[in-house]
Each structure stands twice: as C-alpha cells, then as structure tokens.
Amino acid sequence: MPHDLPPDGELTVFTLGGFGEIVAGADLASLIAAAVDSRLIDGDILAITSKIVSKAEGRQRAATDREQAITDETVRVVATRAHPGGVTRIVQNRQGLIMAAAGVDTSNTPDGVVLLLPVDPDASARALCTALRARTGLRLGVVITDTAGRPWRDGQTDIAIGAAGLAVLDDLRGTADASGRRLDVTAAAVADEIAGAADLVKGKTSGNPVAVVRGLAHLVGDMTLAGASALQRPSETDMFRLGTNEAHDEGYAEGYAAGRAAALTEDAFD
C-alpha cells in the first residue's frame, strides 16, 4: 500500500445516527446502509463498535457469574492483580487479543447478561465490508473496534480487533525519513489509529456505534488485505509476555525444576 498522506492532509470523522437497540440476528449491513443515507464517498472507512456486532451475532450470554464467563473465554493468563473490589485479570482470549477480562463486557447490557466479543472479528468485518460495498457500489473499508488498556500508559483507547478492505499496518521500514535516514522499525498501526479517532466522536454512552473516517482513501484496498489479527504480536517476539509476578513465578519454578534435576543426576553418579 502507498505511504503518502492524502494531498490536502485533511481527516474528517463523523457518526451515523439512527441506530436503536441491536438484537440477535439483526442485519447490520442493512441497518448501516440505511443510516448512511448517501453520505458515504469512495475511500471512506467505517469504524463499528464491536458491541453491536456481538449483539447481532448473538454473543450475549446469561451469566450471573462474570468471572466464569471470563474464565471460559481465556486461553492464557498474562497477569492478575488483586484490588479491593476483586481481581483484575489480563488474559489472552480466544480471538488472540490480550485484554482485561478477556473482553467480556457488562456495560449497556441487561442485568445477568454479559457480552462476549465476536467469535472471529476479521470474518465479521469482511462480511460487513463485502455487503456494504455491494449495497453502495463504493470502495469502503471496515474496522471493528473495542476498548483496551495499554502497557505503560494510564487510561484506555479503542483499538481495531477486526478489519477488512484496508491496510491495517503502514510499514515504513526500508524507506527514508525527511532527513534521508533509513527507517528500520517504523510501522504505523493505522487501523488502531483509525479506531482511536472514531472513538473521539462515537463516545461511550452517546448511542453512536458507527463512525465514518474520511481522508484515508490511500489505505483502502481490496478484500485480500490482512485483517486486524495481523497486528497481534507473536509470542516469540513479545518482550513482555507475562506480568512481573507471573514471570517471577515461572522463572522460580523453572529454576527449581532444573536444580532438582541436577541434584538427582548428581545423586545417581555418587
């Protein structure tokens, strides 16, 4: 994908109104197309809150015990921290995302109901993007967003958990900066930046689950482009795969096992 910014350097972000409560089985593509009302242009990117995708896909679950729902969605525990209200769990979930509480959400849901993330957010994004392109005749991109915290930084921001029809990473490695120096590590996570920009206008309680990001048509391409899962760092290159306490416990256990094995080997030769 090209790295050049749009000629005028202008970015526009706005919401689409007209969404009521989304229920299981809802045709999101039709609802979004109706809300668009011919406001889209070629190259627009739609940032869609994962919550409405989950609701449409029936990912609501009756669960008086939210902790059990988190456990069920967890593949690997990264870190836990006790606090006066309970225990915060940072985990890798079934989608491969590392998030607090595995992405299990209780906000804007009835009592006794939790909302799980889409089973395959990239597949959901592809289905929506394909349907919206067919309905509008426009070259569009779709990003499915969710809120997440970040290491080393307070607060949360929206990130892309699913994407289709656009480059999710603008890899500048091998190019030169303004001074002619070679860039060796710079790769902009543009799908996450789009999600964060959209969150500024969608908000958390305003009832605006879909935003349009305009001005990044150079990122929009065909449906073979990699989805948001391409942004997940492989464990072998993750320098912070575990929390500090968990890393200490794992190292202690490995050291103890190695020491015990060495002692047994020495005893065998005595």
Image (cartoon, rainbow, N blue to C red):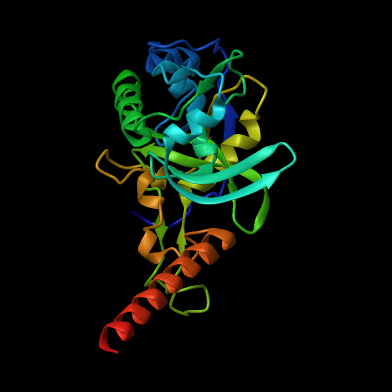
Residue 239 horizontal/vertical position (percent):
47, 67
Residue 157 horizontal/vertical position (percent):
61, 43
Q: Nearer the viewer, residue 234 or 137?
A: 234
Q: In this orientation, does residue 4 appear?
A: yes
Residue 161, compared with residue 175, is above or below; it is above
Q: Residue furthest front?
A: 270
Q: How many marks?
A: 0
Q: Residue furthest right?
A: 84
Q: Nearer the viewer, residue 170 or 204?
A: 204
Q: In this orientation, does residue 6 appear?
A: no
Q: Quadrant of the C terminus?
A: bottom left
The residue lying at 43 percent from left, 32 percent from top is 72
Q: Residue furthest bottom?
A: 270
Q: Quadrant of the N terminus?
A: bottom left
Q: Nearer the viewer, residue 18 or 70?
A: 70
The residue lying at 52 percent from left, 78 percent from top is 179
Image position of 83 (left or right of 22):
right
Image position of 270 (left or right of 257):
left
The residue lying at 40 percent from left, 11 percent from top is 26
Residue 55 horizontal/vertical position (percent):
46, 18
The residue lying at 29 percent from left, 27 percent from top is 130
Residue 112 horizontal/vertical position (percent):
57, 15
Residue 245, compared with residue 54, is above or below; it is below
